[in-house]
Amino acid sequence: MAAPIRNHNGEAIAAGAFTLPAAWALEGQVVLCSAVQETCRRISYRTGYSESLAQEHRLIWMSVDGQVRLQAKSQRERGPRVDCSVLATLL
């Protein structure tokens, strides 16, 4: 069973929302992006974040005008690890 991705306010993203396996529990939680440079470069291109942010910073899902976005969070934040290639397919 898949759980809806939630924005920073805990609200489920609108109809047709992306879904992920419930085990990943990304419901508004911070995500650590840990993958190879090439994949992070794709995320950088799609989100406007620098590659260093994509590689080293934790990211959080947000909903802006119905679109999924990523926002850099403090490195002190904790959260589940998700491979960048998975994030890239959702952006």
Image (cartoon, rainbow, N blue to C red):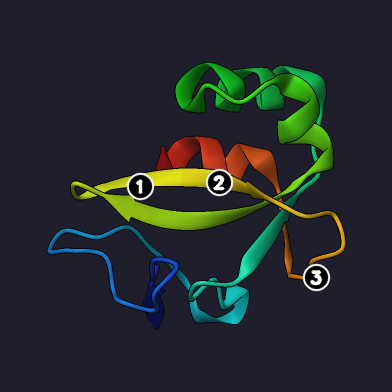
Could you say which disc has been placed on residue 3 in the image? none
- Tell me which amino acid carries mark 1: Val
Front one among 9 and 45: 9
Q: CA distance from mark 3 to mark 2?
A: 14 Å
What's the residue at 30%, 76% (across, down)? Answer: 11
- Tell me which amino acid carries mark 2: Gln
Q: For mark 3, give the secondary structure.
A: loop
Question: Cβ–Cβ below 8 Å for labels 2 and 1?
Answer: no
- Answer with mark 1 or mark 3, whichever residue precedes in sequence: 1
What's the residue at 55%, 46% (across, down)? Answer: 71
Q: CA distance from mark 2 to mark 1?
A: 10 Å
Could you say which disc has been placed on residue 71 in the image? 2
The crowding category of the residue bearing disc 2, from other C-alpha atoms within 10 Å (few below 14, some 14 to 19, many at least 20), is: some
Q: Quadrant of residue 67?
A: top left
Q: Where's the C terminus, which quadrant?
A: top left
The residue where tag 1 is placed is 68
Relative height, residue 67 to residue 37 (above, below): below
Q: Position of residue 14 (x, y in %)?
A: 17, 63
Q: Position of residue 68 (x, y in %)?
A: 35, 47
What's the residue at 32%, 55% (across, down)? Answer: 63
Horizontal relation, residue 43 to residue 33: left or right: left
What's the residue at 74%, 70% (across, down)? Answer: 79
- Answer with mark 3 or mark 2, whichever residue precedes in sequence: 2
